[in-house]
Image: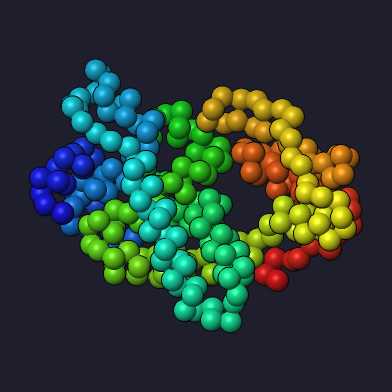
Amino acid sequence: MRPSVIADLFPVVGFLNQEKKKKLEDILQITIQTPSIFEQALIHRSYLQVLFSPQAQQPLQRAYSNERLEFLGDAILSYITAEFLFYMRADFLMGELTKMRSWLVNKKSLAYCARQLRLHECMMLSGSARQSLESGNDSMLADVLEAIIAAIYLDSGHTAATNFVVTIVLGKLFQEAALVSDSNYKSILLEYAQANSFGNPKYHTVHESGPDHVKEFVVQVLLDERIVGTGQGRSKKDAEQIAAKAALELLKVALPTDGE
């Protein structure tokens, strides 16, 4: 990218000094050429209020959160993962490739990888968002990893991004066999329901509580208009998975063990 484009899209914030830059390079195993791109990748939207506060030591005119980089990184990650699986799992059919890719690029997997890389130590967050992260809200970790992937791509190109995704991200996830093979209980319940002519399971959110950054959801799953499971989680998706698992246990459906 031209310097003028970089300056326009990635204004310098200044927190990624030489010491922090070196720490991030060691974590990611890369060389950072344009620090401002990585500064943006580490800025959660909650931190903008800190940067623009009149009380800030050096109030900024422009700064952006990592959401746009997250958008780009999500697409890059999906493409690289799909290409990797296409060549490395030649014995898999399309459905199996799709399922494995979903295991690898879902929020839970990415958050696990981001935490293993200690990216939470580098993120710029507001105080309340930091508390949310420490309380187990991992979606921010998944988002920052996607933003970092985009930053590597923009700063060093496709080959560097591919090396990072395959070697670091997928490498860590394949080592964590239990996480990679983590059962999709909703899919198992759906297959069971269709095989036994129950129709599709229905999920209903019956309760949600708490502020936006630490919400709790309670979800029930119905099969043939009968409540068969209830789950509680920090997102509707997590609560639905827990409800589906409870339903499978009630129905005495055999569940795969970790690593199977």
The residue at 29%/69% (across/down) is: 159
Percent from the top left, x then y, of residue 51?
27, 28
The residue at 24%/52% (across/down) is: 21
Vertical relation: 234 (above or below) 188: above
Q: Quadrant of the C terminus?
A: bottom right
For the residue pair 226 and 237, the one nearer the viewer reads as 226
Give the quarter of the image for residue 49.
top left
Vertical relation: 161 (above or below) 146: below
The residue at 35%/51% (across/down) is: 72
The residue at 16%/40% (across/down) is: 8
For the residue pair 154 and 121, the one nearer the viewer reads as 154
For the residue pair 154 and 49, the one nearer the viewer reads as 154
Vertical relation: 52 (above or below) 78: above
Vertical relation: 103 (above or below) 17: below
Percent from the top left, x then y, of residue 255?
79, 62
Give the quarter of the image for residue 44.
top left
Percent from the top left, x then y, of residue 125?
38, 35
Left or right of residue 79, residue 28 in this image = left
Q: Quadrant of the N terminus?
A: bottom left
